[in-house]
Image: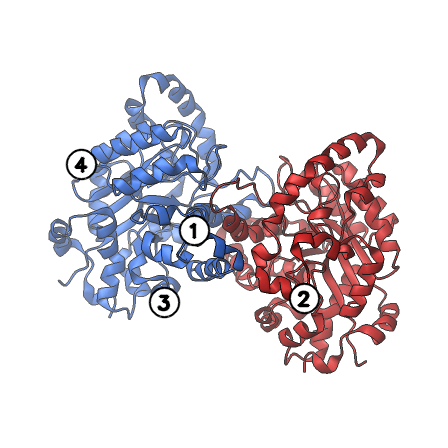
Chain colours: A red, B blue
Amino acid sequence: MDRYLLISSDCHAGPLPNQARGYVSPKFRNAFDTWVADVKGKQRRRAEHTGAAIYGEEAVKDFDVDVKDQGSKMAGAWDSKQRLEEMDRDGVVAEVIYPGASIETITPFDVGLMTYQYPQGAYNRWLAEFCAEVPGRRAGVGLITVDDIDAAVSEIRWMRDSGLTGGIVLPVDTNGHPYYNHPRYEPLWAVCEDLDVPIHAHVGWTPNYGDYKGSLGIFLSEITWWGRRSFHFLIWSGVFERHPKLRFVMTEMGQDWVVPELADLDKKYEMPMFRHMRRELPRHPSEYFARNCYMGAAFMARDVVEMRHEIGVDKLMWGSDYPHIEGTWPHTAEKLGVAFAGVPQAECQQMLGGTAAEVYGFDVDELAKHAAEMGPKTANIGA
Amino acid sequence: MDRYLLISSDCHAGPLPNQARGYVSPKFRNAFDTWVADVKGKQRRRAEHTGAAIYGEEAVKDFDVDVKDQGSKMAGAWDSKQRLEEMDRDGVVAEVIYPGASIETITPFDVGLMTYQYPQGAYNRWLAEFCAEVPGRRAGVGLITVDDIDAAVSEIRWMRDSGLTGGIVLPVDTNGHPYYNHPRYEPLWAVCEDLDVPIHAHVGWTPNYGDYKGSLGIFLSEITWWGRRSFHFLIWSGVFERHPKLRFVMTEMGQDWVVPELADLDKKYEMPMFRHMRRELPRHPSEYFARNCYMGAAFMARDVVEMRHEIGVDKLMWGSDYPHIEGTWPHTAEKLGVAFAGVPQAECQQMLGGTAAEVYGFDVDELAKHAAEMGPKTANIGA
C-alpha cells in the first residue's frame, strides 16, 4: 500500500447546548436551562486561556481560524458532515473521540474533561448517535461519574450495547471519593476487563487555582501530573495484576516523562520493603506498563518519535487532536513528514494506526478501502 | 585547611512527649495529654513504614540500630549532649534542624512535617532552647500554620528574636486555605524577605491514601511532587519577582528533577501567552531559581554531584539527614568520599558548607575552629 491507514487516537467532539438539550433527561432539563444561561460568562473566562492567548497570533493565522468567532469555524466539533469532510481531507480514516471540543461544547452541565459531578448520560447518548453516523470510523469515549459505581457499571454496559467503542474516561477528580486504590472501584475494573473496554486518562482537570497571579502558569505546570495521577494508583494497587487484560490509555499528556518515570517506579519496586508485597504485585511497574498501558500521543513530537523504542513502538498511538488548534489538523501529512522523518514505514504504520486499530477494535479491512483513497502517502512520511 | 567545614543542611530533632509537655500552652495541655494517650497506635502504624521495612535488614545492621527499639538508639533526636557527640564524631560542625526526627518525636499534636492544624509554638519554644545549648552550631527551622497569616508573621518575628536562625517550613498542606499564589500570603513573603528568613519546602506530607492496597508505593511515587508543589506557585505568581531577596530552599526531595523541570518551565514561559505577563514576571523561571532558590540536598548522590554545574554548584547544600537511617550518619566521611570523588575541593567545600554558611548566616570563623579538629579530611574527599 502506498498510503498509511491513519487513525487519530485523540480527537474531540461535543454538542452545542441547543443540540444537547434533547438528550438531557426531562428531570434535569430545568437545571440544564439554568446552566446554559449561566455558561456565557464561563466561556468568556475560558476564552482567555485558549486560541491566540496561548498559541500566539501566528499559530492562529496558520490554523486559518478567527478565534474571536472560533465556534463557527470549529463546527466539525458538532457537525458530523463537516467533520467527516475535514477528516478526509486531512487523511484521517478513523478516530477516537473525547469530549472537550471547544468552549461552546463543554457539554451539558460542564462535564467533559473538566468536571464530573453531573450525570453524563446526555453526552453519551449524543455521542453514540454522532458515531453511528459514520459506521466503523468513530470510536466514542464515554463519560462516567464515580459517585455511584454500580451506576457507572450500568452506563458502561449501555455504552457497549450502543456502539460506543472508545471506552471510558476515568475522572481525574473523584468528587470527594477516595482515589483509585480504593476497593470501591473493583467492579469498574472488572467490567472494563470483561467487556474489553479501554480506560483512559486524559489531561483536563486540575484543582481550581483561583483568579490570582500565576494561575495559568501553575495550570500548565501541573496539568500533566494531575492527568496521569491515576497511573500510580492503578500500578501500585495491583489493578493490572488482578486484571491482566485491562487496557489503560494515557492521552494528550506528553510522552517524554514515560521512560524516566518507569525507571523511577521500578527502582522503588526494588526497595526492600516490596519484598513483602511481591505476592500481590509480582511484576515491575514497567512490566505492567508494557502489558496493560498505551499512550494516546496527540501530535507526537519529534523527540518522542526518537524515544519510540524505549517507550515501545507498540505503546504509542498518534493523535491529531482535531479540532484543536494545537494539534496537527489541517496540516497533518506535512507535520507527520517532519516528525517521523527517517523512521521505518512499518514502525510508522504501527504508531499511526496499527496499535489503535487493535486497542479499539477497528475493522482494518474496511478502513483500508478508505485509506487507499485518502491516507497520507507513505512516500512522504518515514523511510 | 586540611579539613572541610562541614554543615548539614538537613537534620531532624524533636522532643519526646514528656519533654514537650512543659512547652505546650496551659490551655492546650489537656488536649495534648489526650493526643499523647492516642499516639501509640499511630506510632505502630508509622513504624511499618520505617526502618527495616523500607531500607532492609542490611541497611539497619550497617546503621547499628535495633529498629525494634529505635527510640533509645536515636536519642540524639532529643538529647542535646548525645547529639553533639555524634555530630562531632561524624565530622559535622553545624546543622540545620527540621522536625520529624523519629516516630517517638512527631512533636506535640503530630505537627512537624506531616500535619499543621495545631499551634506550633510548643515545638518552636523547645527548638529555640535546644539550639541555644550549642551556640552558633544549630540553625533551627521553625513551624508555622497558615490558618492565620498575622499570627504566622508574629511567630516568625518571635523566632528571629529567639535565635531560631534556620527559617521556617512552608506547610505542604494548607489546611483548606487557598494555595500559595493567593494574595493572603503576601505578608508572609514580606516579613521573610525583610528579616532574611529562609523559607523551606521539605518532603513529608502527602494526601492520605488510606489503608488500601498500594498506598506505600503511591506515597513514595508522589511525596516529592507534593513536597515541591509550592515551587510552581511561588515562581508563577511572581513572589520571587516582588521579593528579590527572598530565599527558598527545597530539602530532601532529590535534585535530579531540577534541570529538566526548569527547562520545562522556561519553555512554558516562552509560550506566546506569557508575552502579556512579562511586565509582572520579566524573568524566566530558571532565573528566579538561580537567584532565589537552593536545594537542601540530603545525602547527595553521585548522579547529582555529576549534575552540579547544570543545577549550580552554589545551589546545592549537602545534608546528612541525621538521625535518619537513610542518611549518611554515622559514616559521613566515607560516603562523601564516594559521592564527591574527583570533584575539585573548592567545589566540594561550597556544597559541603560554603553555601549553607551564607544562607543561614553561620559564623564561619567560629566554626572553622571546630572544623580544624573534627571536619572530614580534604585528602579523602574530592580531588
Question: Tag 1, which chain?
Answer: B
Quadrant (top left/top right/bottom left/bottom right) for the N terminus of chain A: bottom right
**Rounded to the nearest whole Å, what is the CA distance between mark 2 and mark 3?**
39 Å
Report the residue at 62% width, 41% height from top: A179
* Labelled pair 3, 4 in contact (Cβ < 8 Å): no
| Comparing labels 1 and 4, the label whose residue is closer to the camera | 4
* Labelled pair 1, 4 in contact (Cβ < 8 Å): no
* Mark nearer the N terminus (1 vs 3): 1
Using the image as rendered, state which of residue A252 and residue A68 is in the foreground: A68
Q: Is residue A134 above or below residue A169?
A: below
Measured as percent of width and height from the top left, residue B199 is found at: 33, 43
**Rounded to the nearest whole Å, what is the CA distance between mark 2 and mark 1?**
54 Å
Q: Residues within 10 Å of mark 3 (few under 14, many from 20)?
A: few
Residue position marked by numbered label 1 in the rendering: B57
Disc 3 marks a residue whose amino acid type is Glu
Disc 1 marks a residue whose amino acid type is Glu
Residue position marked by numbered label 3 in the rendering: B306
Q: Quadrant of residue A325?
A: bottom right
User: Which of the labelled discs sits on residue B133, or is there none?
Assistant: 4
Question: Tag 3, which chain?
Answer: B
Measured as percent of width and height from the top left, residue B47 is found at: 45, 39
Measured as percent of width and height from the top left, residue A85 is found at: 82, 64
SS for callout 3: helix
On the same chain: label 3 and label 4? yes
**Rounded to the nearest whole Å, what is the CA distance between mark 1 and mark 3?**
30 Å
Residue position marked by numbered label 2 in the rendering: A328
